[in-house]
Amino acid sequence: MDLIQVMEMFPDQEACIAHLERLRWKGSPQCPHCESTSVKRRNENAMGRIGRWNCHDCHSTFKRTSGTIFQGTKIALQKGFLAISLMTNAKKSLSSCQLARDLGMKQKAAWRPMMRIRAEMGKDNVLGQGIIEADETYIGGKRRKDYDKEKGVPRKRGRGTAKDAVIGAVARGGKVVAELVSDMTGETIADFIKRGVNTEDAKLYTDQFKGDNDIGKEMEHETINRSEKWEADGVHTNTIEGFWSFVKRAWYGSHHHYSTGYTPLSLAEACYKDNYRGTNIFDKFRTESME
Ligand SMILES: [Zn+2]
């Protein structure tokens, strides 16, 4: 959705709130404290009290933004919605400085909602079943680093910063998930796969990467030796490889200063964009995250 469409759909605070209310309550508003449906929206419009509700049973008041990623942020909801749109539309990862410039706010004010939006994107992490391709990669850092195959940990070279080890999996014709890992041992890989994949109904394709034999005991698993050929009888990892290129272009295009702290959120953003390309994100985007 482009910015014009966002502005048209959500022209003001009122329209944003109405959207959040629709998503949340689907037509029947409820008190978050006592679950009573005997609630009424206040009409007052001054002093930012818009969006507040009264509960006739427990006599509490609540806001629609309570329990959403916008809870406690001071930015106008429309800016929050525009931020989601700008972030999902950006080919590369957007910096908070850029977002602040685009939305006419200070960098510090843009940073927090941006991190929350990314964190929310990261909650979408189930792959399901079918053919799953899994692979590892390394991102960030300033120099190439070696990988200690025996210990399963990154090995620093010279004064260079070690890169982050990242593991990812994609369901063919479906979603992709990826996360930062502290090592590439068989245990870590198996844990990652089992969290995102229904091992009974899925078939795993990997390169012959370190430690992946553990998972082979728990599900159907085939490997391809990429140093010999890219594909054999449909067994390949080209889809996840393509995703790594996307992640790296986004990463190196916008992060001039490397920091491991942002890697998980950057990955979450890349996965989300890949998974929801061309869909109406405002119907999908889960704003219930803080509950
Ligand atoms: Zn109540």
Image: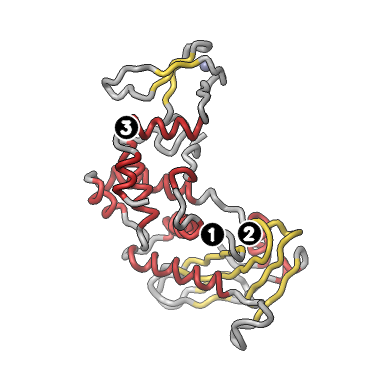
In which image quadrant can residue 69 be found?
top left
Give me the C-alpha separation between circle 2 and circle 1: 8 Å
User: Is 276 situated left or right of 236 in this image?
Assistant: left
- The structure residue drawn at horizontal position 58% and vertical position 65%, both measured from the top left corner, is 183
Identify the residue shown where x is 41% and y is 18%: 41
Local secondary structure at mark 2: helix
How many residues crowd around disc 2 within 10 Å: few (fewer than 14), some, or many (20 or more)?
A: many
Furthest toward the bottom, the residue is 228
* Amino acid carrying mark 3 in the image: Gln
With 72 as the anchor, is 25 left or right in this view?
right
Image spot of residue 220 (x, y percent):
75, 68
Is 146 drawn above or below residue 133 in the view shown?
below
Q: Which residue is mark 1?
A: 179
The disc label shown at residue 13, or none: 3
- For disc 1, the neighbor class at 10 Å (few under 14, some 14 to 19, many from 20) is many
Q: Assess whether mark 1 and mark 2 are in contact (beta carbons under 8 angstroms).
A: yes
In primary-sequence order, the first of circles 2 and 3 is 3
- Quarter holding residue 196: bottom right
Report the residue marked by disc 2.
Answer: 192
How does the figure colour the protein chain or chains? secondary structure
Q: Amino acid at mark 2?
A: Phe
Q: Quadrant of residue 257?
A: bottom left
| Label 2 CB less than 8 angstroms from ligand 1 | no
Q: Is residue 218 above or below residue 234?
A: above
Q: Count neighbours of disc 3 (C-alpha within 10 A) and say few if under 14, some if 14 to 19, many if 20 or more.
A: some
Label whose residue precedes the other's in the sequence (1 or 3): 3
Camera-nearest label, 2 or 3: 3
